[in-house]
Amino acid sequence: MGVIVTASAGCGDDAPGPCPVGLVRLGDACLMGCPPSECQCEDGLREVRDASGRLVGCEAEDGGVQDGGVPDGAVPDGAVPDAAPVDAPFCTSAAECADGDPCTEDLCVDGTRCDNPLIDGDGDGFAPASLGACLNPAQSGDCNDGDVDTFPGAPEVCDGVSQDCDAATDEGLPELICFRDQDGDGFPGADIRVSDCACPDGFTEERMDGRFDCADGEAEVFPGQTSYFPASYTTPGGPSFDYDCDGEEELRWPDAPRCINDPEDPVMCILLSAGWAAGNRPGCGETGNGFANGCSGFMGACAPLPTTGGTPTQECR
């Protein structure tokens, strides 16, 4: 700290010696301060006066305090500190925060700021179409503000709903050719088909092997059927035994019965195939006499053994 230096006469220019710290000289006396009209600070120093206007110190422009002044940041004796400023509220109501956008909510937050969030129930970045055009057109037109996957420009999903809010449904999706599988046996008929982005209930895409059902109302009839059946099914062309859709009616027992000696035990007989005796073979769904489904014999002599308990029906596929 320096010493207080005065520039006007009467402030102790010729007085001997400096005053103690905290006092200023007036003539031959050291006083607590100078009257307003009698002392002043040197050029470049800022006056520090008390409430009565007396000079109680000189303060450097950089904030330092000269001898006879007060410490940095302190309030001199009798001085009244400035009151802290009180900020006025930024807003008092939502109306003061209106931004003129029908798609935003106007909010006054704690009186300190305005906020205008987008009205967007599902968080997809688009306001409901019912609000009209937004100030930012790119945020307008959500046709379902409860579905995050539905908004203008959204990708379409094959569900009969317009995800992109243009009123058209399922546009731009790849189309499938679907064939009806009425009996649910995994083989569709070739006659009834639809084109859609997904096959409706009761329809299926064409099989990888390209095979179709020859009787799509009969669940037991399909390509590759391995079972035989004693009764026919009905087709537009009449009764049919073509259960495996190969275009032919295949007999289960087409030949006469055959027996051979067991290679591992020659005294025993083995039945190779059951069937009717020659001349007695019936057609599909018919019966006939002389059906054998076993063998008899001993010591190398084997012969078919006719069945007992009734005559079976010829089965076909």
Image (cartoon, rainbow, N blue to C red):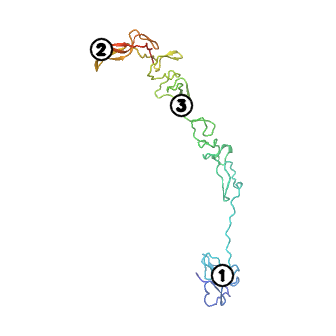
Between the residue at mark 3 and the residue at mark 1, the CA separation in whole angstroms equals: 98 Å
In the image, taking residue 280 as reference, residue 151 lies left or right, namely right
Quadrant into which the N terminus falls: bottom right
Quadrant into which the C terminus falls: top left
Q: Position of residue 219 (x, y in %)?
A: 50, 23
> Local crowd at mark 3 within 10 Å, few (<14), some, or many (≥20)?
some
Helix, strand or loop at mark 2: strand
Q: Earlier in the sequence, mark 3 or mark 1?
A: 1
Between the residue at mark 3 and the residue at mark 2, the CA separation in whole angstroms equals: 66 Å
**Amino acid identity at mark 2:** Phe
Tell me the tag on residue 298: 2
Residue at 68% over, 43% down: 130
Q: Earlier in the sequence, mark 2 or mark 1?
A: 1
Between the residue at mark 2 and the residue at mark 1, the CA separation in whole angstroms equals: 148 Å
Residue farthest to the front, as pictured? 309
Residue at 30% over, 17% down: 268
Tell me the tag on residue 116: none
> Local crowd at mark 2 within 10 Å, few (<14), some, or many (≥20)?
few
Please identify, in this view, whether the residue under mark 3 or under mark 2 is nearer the observer: 2
The answer to whether residue 265 shows anywhere in this view is yes
Tell me the tag on residue 56: 1
Q: Position of residue 136 (x, y in %)?
A: 65, 48
Residue annotated with mark 3: 176
**Amino acid identity at mark 1:** Val
Q: Earlier in the sequence, mark 3 or mark 2?
A: 3
In the image, taking residue 197 as reference, residue 311 lies left or right, namely left
